[in-house]
Amino acid sequence: VNKVETAVRIKHVPTGLTVKCTEERSQATNKARAMALLKARLDVIAREQQLEEIAQIRGDVVKAEWGQQVRNYVMHPYKMVKDVRSGWETSNVSAVLDGALDEMIVATLKWRESKHDE
C-alpha cells in the first residue's frame, strides 16, 4: 500500500510551543489546521498573561460584605462615626460629613505606621 506522509508539525520558536496535525490526508489542510490550533493556543497564553497583569495591578480585592467595612456612620438612635481600623471615633457626625476629616486622617496614618512597623 502506498501512503504519503501528510503530517505537519509546527513549532513557535519564541515560546517553544509545538503543534502536530495528522487528521487529514492533505498536507495543505493539515498545515492550515495546525496553524489555526497554534494560533488558538497562543491566544490562550496571551489572555492568561493579560489576566495575570490585570490581577497584579488590581492587587488584593476585598468583597464588600458585612464585616468588611472600614468606617461606620451611625445617625440613629445615636450619632457616631467610627474608623474600624484605627479605632478613632467621634459623635460629631455632621462635622465629619461636612469635611472635618483631619483627626480621622491622623488616626489612620498612625494606624498605618504602627501596622508597617510590625
Image: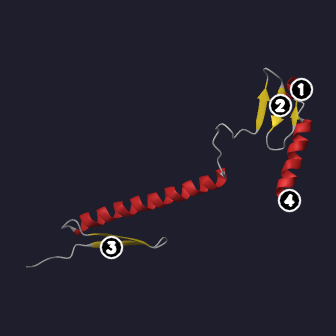
The answer to which of 114 and 26 lies nearer the viewer is: 114
Dot 1: what SS?
A: loop
In the picture, the quarter occupied by the C terminus is bottom right
Which residue is at a point 41% across and 61% down the rendered structure image? 41
Q: Determine which of the numbered discs, if any, sits on residue 81 in the image.
A: 2
The CA distance from mark 1 to mark 4 is 31 Å
Amino acid type, label 2: Val
For marks 3 and 1 on the same chain, the one whose residue lies earlier in the sequence: 3
Q: Which residue lies under the disc numbered 3? A: 9
The CA distance from mark 3 to mark 1 is 74 Å
Dot 4: what SS?
A: helix
Quadrant assignment, res 5: bottom left
Residue reaching furthest to the top: 77
Mark 3: few/some/many CA within 10 Å (<14, 14-19, 20+): some
Where is residue 95? Give x, y as percent.
89, 26
Dot 2: what SS?
A: strand
Which residue is at a point 48% across and 70% down the rendered structure image? 15
Where is residue 91? Give x, y as percent.
88, 27
The answer to which of 111 and 2 lies nearer the viewer is: 111
Callout 2 touching callout 4 (CB < 8 Å): no
The CA distance from mark 2 to mark 1 is 8 Å
Which residue is at a point 84% across and 28% down the rendered structure image? 80
Amino acid type, label 1: Asn
